[in-house]
Amino acid sequence: MTWTWFHRLGSPPYVYALARRLTPWFGWSAALLMLAGLFGGLVLAPPDYQQGDGFRIIYVHAPTAWLSLMVYTWMGVAAAVGLIWRIKVAHAVAAACAPVGASFTAVALATGSLFGKPMWGTWWVWTPRLTSELLLLFLYLGYMGLRASFDDTQRADRASAVLAVVGIVNVPIVHYSVVWWNDLHQASSLTLAGKDTIATSMLGPLLVSLLGFTLYFGAILLVRLRAEILRRERSAAWIREALA
Amino acid sequence: MAQSPPPLTAPLAAARLVITRDLMLAFRRPEQLLHPLAFFALVATLFALALGPERATLRLIAPGVLWVAALLAALLALEFLFRDDSQDGTLEQYALSGQSLTWLLLGKTAAHWVLTGVPLALMAPLMGYTLGVPAAASLGIMLTVALGSLALSFIGSIGAALTLGARRGGVLLSILILPLAAPILIFGSRATELAIRGESYLAPMELLGSIVVLSFTLAPLAAAAAVRISLE
Amino acid sequence: MIQFHSWAEFWAMGKYAAYVWPSYALTGVVVLLNVAWARGLLRQARSEAQRRMALQEERT
């Protein structure tokens, strides 16, 4: 089992070139899937028995909520890798993730409110699911604030990495909050094992959207990562070639 | 003449030494300890003033007010957890000493709780009384605030270590701690509310207890990592 | 297949329009904003790096 691929991923020029090559693939497939999911969710899926056409919000709410958790997980893992193996590129990944994750957490909360008002009659309730998602937003903002408060990049990297790793405990709390507590927010309609509780005709666009948003995040991350690497590799020789 | 390095004392003994040192130093300058307590009283008083003298209203909001005030006071107190030792180089000596930094920080944080959390817990029933809480609930209030402030000290130590030497560390500390301290706030005020009503507060206390156990085992690890980072 | 029988129906979203369309609009705006933001950062980083290279070459 060769670990060459792992070591290569620690090399900024290699990662920069790889990111550059991969971005169009992620970007265009994301655009395609997101538009397909949009069309499917808005136009093709049948209205819900109870929630009518209002349930279509789920086609933006679920992917953005999924993104808010997934991005934090990537951020935490990258931070841990950077801390343990002292790989600078990993810290660059974590830094690139944060603003994206924060913005989509905010959107998840907002679309959730817009979903909740017609369905539950209120814009907000302090239930475990909503509260822990709000805390997730604060964790993102704290991470970005901590980074910004250090002038030295290395210290900023390592301090914020500790915070990211400590905060990872919130991710399973958000996810399992509807399982552990009686939450107003409905339980998961999708499970990895076992039966889904959502109708197939509604499920299709949802899965397409989820995949689309995931690839979209990949594309954004790759672009941001390139910017981060360029900023950090002050005057390395490989940059001249890369920019040509 | 080469000296052999000092023998490595057991981590627990090292922690105990740190606790003794911190307690002794604190008793030489007790004014520092009064600030958080004064702040606690002030915040609770402000709430009482703003919400009017109606006793029923005050009693209703008492658990929340007590806990918000306690949290804010604890945040204030966390600023001096590492400050003096980081300024005079003691923290650096701890890191270089060859002893387990995790255990040393565990000791420091425990001492910090004795100096800040315990007085807060003892004062809480008093502020509760001004908020219309019956005196019979005093013990319950003390126990719930004591346990919650213990968890707060440990979780707060991570934030304090991370913001060492950062610009505007105090404000940043509050922002960092908030998501991590929220469960403590939630369960703690729930426990205090039950205590005030005279009902059994065992369930939230157990949850608080598990948070305490988690935090005093894992927080010193994270705090030690953060301290090492700040010393680089 | 297509669930709506007219454009009017589509925009009305079964009386949920006030909730559905702001949700989609907000999501769309943030999606596009992130694209613009990321590309802007990359553009900025590239031009700064190019400027640094140019300065270096001037010195040598």
Image (tube, coloured by chain):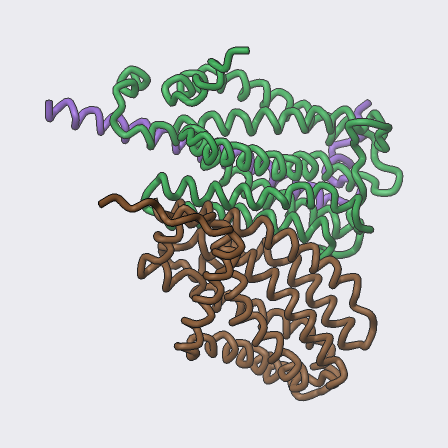
Residue B102, percent from left and from top? 50, 49
Q: Quadrant of residue B47?
A: bottom right
Q: Is residue A218 above or below residue A134?
A: above
Question: As drawn, is B185 to the left or to the right of A217?
Answer: right
- Count all numbered tags in the image, as a single digit: 0
Against C20, is C51 above or below? above
- Residue at the spot 73% in from the left edge and 75% down from the top edge: B140
Q: Quadrant of the C terminus of chain B?
A: top left
Q: Colour of chain C?
A: purple
Give the drawing colour for chain B: brown
User: A226 or C5, which is in the foreground?
Assistant: A226
Which residue is the extreme one toward the top?
A1
Closer to the camera, A32 or C13? A32
Which part of the image, by quadrant, shows the N terminus of chain B? top left
Residue C27 appears at what percent x and percent y? 61, 38
Residue lying farthest to the front in this orientation: B1
Q: State whether residue A205 appears in this view.
A: yes
Q: Residue furthest right?
A: A49
Palette colour of chain A: green
The residue sitting at 60% across, 66% down in the picture is: B149
Q: Where, by quadrant of the figure, is residue A121 drawn?
A: bottom right
Provide residue B103's location: percent of width, then percent of height: 51, 52
Which residue sits at x=69%, y=68%?
B189
Percent x, y for residue A131? 67, 53
Res B166 visible: no
Q: Horizontally, is A205 left or right of A47 in the view? A: left
Q: Nearer the viewer, residue A148 or A117?
A: A148
